[in-house]
Amino acid sequence: MIFSTELLIQTLLSGLMVGVLYALMALGITFIYSIVKTINWAMGEFYMIGSYIQFVAVHFLLGPNWWWLAAILAAAGTFLLGLILEPILIKPMYARPLQRRDDYATVVTIALLLLLRNLAVALGGPNQYRPESNLPVVWIGPLPQEGARVAACLFALLALATFWLIIKKTWVGLALRAAAQNRVAVQTAGVDVYRLDAVAFAIGVALAGLAGALLAPLFMVFPTNGAVTTVKGFEIIVIGGLGSIPGALVGGVLLGLIESLGAAFISSPYQNVYGFLLVILILIIRPNGLFGERGREA
Amino acid sequence: MATPRLQPPLLQAQGLSKRYGGLVANNGVSLSLARGEIRGLIGPNGAGKTTFVNLLTGIETADAGRIRLGDVELGGRPAHAIAAQGLIRTFQVARVFESLSVRDNLLLPFLAAGSPGGLAAGRARLGELLALATLANLADDRAGTLSGGQRMLLQACAGFMVPGVSLHVLDEPFAGINPVVKDTLIQLIRRENASHACTFLIVSHEMDIVRRLCPIVSVMIEGAIAAEGTLDEVARRPEVIAAYLGASAA
């Protein structure tokens, strides 16, 4: 492997760009956990649904020029799906007194994962699709960047900014931040915490759906395409700390960087291994993650 | 206490019961509060006072009994719906939102109630309460940096932010806080009671404060209301003395 500054910068750039999208996925997982206090194991399937919506919208309805509208549709579609599914699947965990909430949520969301995955096979077959992209190569200095990758990164940054605005500046955001700290107190303040759960779940899965839509031209569309991304999402959660929003962002970018550096300078077939090495390292040094404070309460 | 009431009571709790396994925490608690009253609720530790407050405010569901606030039946409603009906509580260990600013802690219940009277009215109320609670210069600090007493003040003020609240239930608001903060809280309670006709149910062990604030107290013993009257009246009742000091003292 020959080292060059150009290769290093190129590698850092592409790592950064993919990292932002990983962060989107991890943010969704951590955000749902911080409000609903449960892990949604079907996160990757919402990523998958987002990528299918993107493909159908671009290929059959809108054409590649309207990729950004398709991405908005994918986010909106997964948001609505989350809003509908949460009250049916997750809410009973709180509304009825259950002894093992975590077990319940795990079983229900894994069942959802299997259902959605098989539904995708039934509807679209086991084939791989790819939405057309006509975005030109972008030159950053002397370095060429794939257009779809740059666009995905910029759009993801826009989505992160929107997320930040909603959380920091709106009253729903204030209620969400309060609920993340104390579910009982937020209820006694007059907030319907169950509705808030549905909104949080919907926002979280919409982030995954959007990641799926934006990555569709790069990582393809097929029934199990969410699996790898989910694993990466959880790697980031371990790196950044469960329930920590800055942890999800920093962890996402860190994972993207490490993967692309490892692929470029060590060996590219092992791209997915470098993240796990980082995870093991973090577990040894800081078991609660970079930004995590407390362990998970069982 | 047999004084005839001219208007119907604001709160009527009848026969509230709650058991945890074999332990009967509340055994048919009945309590009614007149509009504008400041009622004390006293009783030895473990008498079921906090359970009663939890049942009233929907944190837990009663096994039996009825709760009415004005004309509205509250039994079985979720906690947020009870708050929306105008029954707001504080917790013994102040549950403030530690990473939110003091200001946001106060705004949340106001916004949750749908900003009654408009945001400008809310801001004015916010400023007024911050000044009364002597928290004005801490408005932008995180609530997690406040002392225990300040948290208690903040928690009470959060309830005062909503104009439609008719009943405030304060669970041990004076426990473990310094005398200056205690006085500030007493003044706040008196002021809200006088100017907004708010009714209070105050659970407390601080007999001096109960005597100053509450013309009538209810005594809870072993999961039921055992006596009602002025503090000095009930303090003479043998069953009350027995409950506080042990049966041999009666």
Image: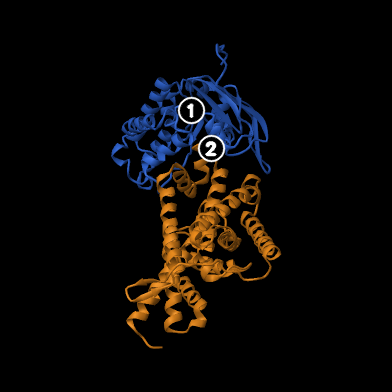
Chain colours: A orange, B blue
Mark 2 closeness class: few <14, some 14–19, many ≥20 residues within 10 Å: some
Q: CA distance from mark 2 to mark 1?
A: 29 Å
Residue at 32% over, 37% down: B135
Residue A144 placement (x, y as % from top left): 39, 75
* Labels 2 & 1 near each other (Cβ < 8 A): no
Residue B161 placement (x, y as % from top left): 42, 32
Q: In the picture, which quadrant includes the C terminus of chain B?
A: top right
Residue at 42% over, 78% down: A261
Residue nearer the viewer, A68 or A281: A68
Residue nearer the viewer, B102 or B133: B102
The residue at which mark 1 appears reads as: B165
Residue B45 has which mark? 2
| Disc 1 residue type (three-letter) | Val
| Circle 1 chain | B
Residue A214 placement (x, y as % from top left): 50, 63
| Circle 2 chain | B
- B221 above or below A4? above
Any part of residue A73 in sight: yes
* Element carrying mark 2: loop
Residue at the extreme left: B137
